[in-house]
Amino acid sequence: MKRIFSAFLLPGIVAGVLCAAQTEPPRPRAIVIFFADDLGYHDTSAYGCDAVPCPNLNSLASQGLVFTDAHSSSSVCTPSRYSLLTGTYAWRRRGMGILPGDAKLILPLKGEQLTLPAMMQLAGYRTAAIGKWHLGLGRGKEPTDWNKVISPSPREVGFDESFIMAATGDRVPCVFIQNGRVVGLDPADPIRVNYEPDFRFPGEADAADLTEEQLNGVLKPWGRSADKQHDKTIIDGISRIGHMQGGKAALWKDQDIADRIDDAAVRFIRENAGKPIFLYFCTNDIHVPRDPNRRWRGASRLGIRGDVTVQMDGSLGAVRKALADAGYKPEETLLIFTSDNGPVIADGYLDGAPEDCAGHNPAAPFSGGKYTLREGGTRMPFIVHWPGVVQPGRSAALISQVDLARSLARLIGFDKIPEGSMDDSQDMLPALCGQDAKGRDELPEHANWGSLIALRVGNLKLTPTRQGSWQLYDLETDPGEENDIAGQRPEVVKDLKERIRRIKAANGGINQTLWSEK
Ligand code: NG6
Ligand code: CA
């Protein structure tokens, strides 16, 4: 009794009691979304994969609420990130899918629609986007000029500060962009980018144009034999998607990407110490090309794909340490760890991952992964870490990353969401705090282009096929989606099909024009 009483005097524990009593939790001083790239449900020790030791994530999991049925909104990056930041389903928008590296910004700007970062900013948080972006930059018909201030960029969306990679590690331009400017650019060596398939800059050869002999010593050993998309301009010994010329002084070194991103986050946290902060931190790990820093080589028993996962864990450690060093107490700091889409082993480079990961199902116990409509595509590692407020444990609540917008709105007491904003987001704050074990009634799952969606209702899942038929699975008994029971449950198929029709028709329907095309 005495112990409980003395614990009760600690402010964090008081908040925990408040949360447990289903009253409102306090407003955190730091809110961090730690967003990994292509990390699967079963890729880390925190979710049962002992071949990939992730001590920082383990500690987060032991002190936090570990979700077992939390989802990204899509099984690929751009739509997933778009949904998280806007609180709307990306598949409602025309032309939504994995973007090229020279794509225009697809997010609504401040004043057009209220997004998660813009809301945090209005609520008095200092906001930052750090790491992978992949949501386009600039607007209008003219190609983006990488040598000037690029606008609009994250700043116009609601991020006070940004330090980003424009798209992915395997797409040009291979430079960091800080607050709209390419970092370290020499004006005498301007950057040019081109994504036309048969394009060549004068005097430049794609990796595909060179013989094995010519490539010897030019490509990193594992970077040889990239697929047809990834065999264009060679940068840092790795052939990429797209063509790039110039900007030599600004080019990143792949083995330093994690450190550069970590440093930017640490700087942001340090410089804003004491202020309310919202950090959208996006690792490049564990996306291809997987080129871990030397100090993480051999850190896992699953080759370089496992090693970059341990590197990602190092980034988590760096961010957590920076928060503590800057004086953000655990009970003032809400950290949500998750990933943008499901796992993939071979993704364009013959980097040895299939051999090194033999026997490892990165989505276990589910099937599928990145690009797919199976559970592995969107069921994400997802941990809510808020010591003293959210009790440690596990939750099977069905939630989606699209719900973060309205859940965080409630958390920070923001009640001015305009009509037409965050339409698909549901307030899941009780589930995030461990006070509601159920979460959503229904959840659409999406894969890449178009608006083909599967639907989860409880443990039942209805999935469309490209041929126009439907499959039904009971994930309770069949998490791997192996036994189609559509034929045995026609009434369920009918009900779920009708629900899909209704969800698609809601909130403005589908195929609305992208904001950047207006
Ligand atoms: C795909 C790439 C893949 C990866 C993906 C984007 C090919 C054949 N594959 O088009 O390597 O870059 O795009 O990944 O080019 S994501 O995580 O950003 O969605
Ligand atoms: Ca991804």
Image (cartoon, grey):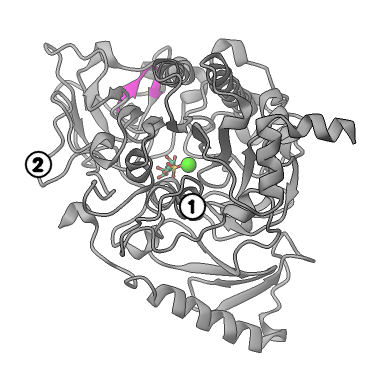
Above or below, comparing residue 478 to residue 53 in the picture:
below
Query: What range of the chain is rendered magenta?
Result: 233-238
Residue 400, magenta (yes or no): no
In the rendered image, residue 110, in percent from the top left (x then y), is placed at 24, 46
In the rendered image, residue 438, in percent from the top left (x then y), is placed at 68, 62
* Residue 50 visible (yes or no): no
Q: Give the crowd class for mark 2: few <14, some 14-19, many >=20 residues within 10 Å.
A: few
Q: Amino acid at mark 2?
A: Glu
Quadrant holding ligand 1?
A: top left
- Horizontal arrangement in the rendering, residue 201 relative to residue 284 (left or right): left
Mark carried by residue 142: 2
Q: Amino acid at mark 1?
A: Arg
Badge count: 2
* Residue 238 visible (yes or no): yes
Where residue 127 sits, quadrant-wise, is top left
Give me the residue at 51% from left, 37% from top.
Answer: 35
Q: Give the crowd class for mark 1: few <14, some 14-19, many >=20 residues within 10 Å.
A: some
* SS label for mark 1: helix
